[in-house]
Each structure stands twice: as C-alpha cells, then as structure tokens.
Amino acid sequence: MAFPLISIIGTGNLAQHLSRNFENCGLRIAELYGRNLQKAKAITSKLYDARVTSDLDFSDSEASLFFLCVSDEAIADIADELVLPKGSVLVHCSGATPLEAIARDGAAYGVFYPLQTFTASRKVSFEGLPVCLEASTDEAELLLEKIAIKLRALPYFMSSEQRLCLHLSAVFACNFTNHFYRISKDILQDQGLPFQLLKHLIEETARKTFDLGPENAQTGPALRSDNATMQKHLSLLGNHEEWKALYQKISSDIQAKNYQV
C-alpha cells in the first residue's frame, strides 16, 4: 500500500526515535513541530527532507498522518490547537491517555503506543517491539497496523483501559525497577564497589523471569523468611528511612504472595 506523508509534533525522546525509525523503513516525514526550534532542527538534520515548523496550523501541509509525541499533560491542549488538512488522521503515542482525548468531529484519530523505554542517546530498534493500537475508524486502525508491520513491530489491538493497565504494569517492570537499580548503585558506591558487579545477576533475573514466570523465579531472604539476614540489611541502611520502609514493605509483599519456595 502507499503510505501517507507523516508529520511529527514534538521534539522529545519518542519524537526522535519515531522519526528516525519511520525514515529507516521508507516512510517520509514532511514536517516536525517544536516550540524549541534549535532542538527541532537538531532532529531534522538527521532526516531526509523534513522541514521544521513552530506553527500548529498544518492546513497547507502535504502530510495526512500526524503523530502527537508530547507529554501526556499536553496532548489534549495541543490537539485542540491543531489545524489539520481535511481527511487527515491524528494519532497520540501515550500509554496512559484515552483515545477520546484527541477526538475530533468528522476526523479520524488513533493511538500508536510503542511499549519501550526511550532515551535520546540510545538507538532502539522497533523490530519485534509491541506497539499498542486503537483507532476511531477501521481505516485508521488498518493504517496504523500497516505502519507497525512496516517497522517490523508487533501490533496489538487493545482498548484505552487495557492500555492503561499495560502502562501501569510497565511502570512496575521498568521505572520502579530502574529506581531500585539506582538505590543498589548508591549502596555499592558507599562501600567503593562498582555497580557492574550486579550485571550478571540482573541479566539472569530477567532471563529466568520469562523462562520460568515471575511467580516461579523469586528468590531471596524474604521468600525464605530469613529474618536474621533481613535485620542485618535494615541495620546497614542506617539513616536511609525511605529505603528501610521500601525494604520492609516489599519484603512483606513477597511473603504475602503464594511463591513456590
């Protein structure tokens, strides 16, 4: 099928990754909108012939597919300000924002949510990546599915409620886990030890979680009810009251679950 020209609205991590991956698979970016023109120009300098704009009036644009890659708080407001060509499709890329947040009378709209953590300095391939899709029309849904497939991603159709639950799950699996890595690193640094010591442990934990299922992969002193070791750990945490509270709460939650010992 012939794919429409695309415009990207936003200059954050997702906008950078989407625009590069779109062009790498043969899709063309017509414009990139950004309030920070310097940042927008830095992104388009790595694209084929996308132009930079700071105007949300796209009525004369050649594009007919518009991706909102902005913060969740800004999605509805920017969607209200947009002026789009007749017959265009507006898409947001948020895990926690409902489809109807960008509803437009007489226009198609949708969601294209790649389930991944994006950092500007790191390359991320969309191959095999789950992309959550939802749309107001069958035609828009089919278009988003074709784009996901062109990226070699895995399209998943789900409701806004299901996507929000997935986003919540991802916060536990990714954001909270990374925060615990930060705490782990701080504890090691206090003793002059490198975070790299945990690399094999972290990698094996991730592997066996998917090989065995998380319900069968849990280990550690809380699971064994090794209270003596847990008290030693709490003593080592010293004046870090927040870390102590986290340690105790999570240990209690582990013990409350029906894990296999």
Image (tube, rainbow, N blue to C red):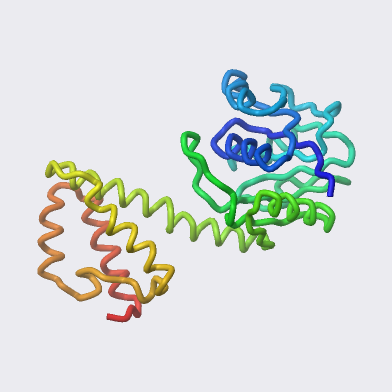
Quarter of the figure with the C terminus = bottom left
Horizontal arrangement in the rendering, residue 86 relative to residue 251 (left or right): right
Residue at point 59%, 49% (across, down): 126
Number of numbered callouts drawn: 0
Residue at point 72%, 25% (across, down): 49
Q: Can you tell which quarter of the image residue 247 is in?
A: bottom left
Residue at point 70%, 54% (across, down): 149
Outermost residue, top direction?
A: 38
| Residue 219 position in % (x across, y down) | 26, 71
| Residue 77 position in % (x across, y down) | 68, 36
Horizontal arrangement in the rendering, residue 156 relative to residue 209 (left or right): right
> Looking at this view, is 124 or 34 the one in front?
124
Q: Can you tell which quarter of the image residue 92 is in?
A: top right
Q: Can you tell which quarter of the image residue 131 is in?
A: bottom right
Residue at point 63%, 41% (across, down): 21
| Residue 60 position in % (x across, y down) | 86, 26
> Looking at this view, is 188 or 54 the one in front?
188
Horizontal arrangement in the rendering, residue 157 relative to residue 127 (left or right): right
In the image, residue 26 sits, relative to residue 151, either above or below, namely above
In the image, residue 143 sits, relative to residue 189, either above or below, namely below
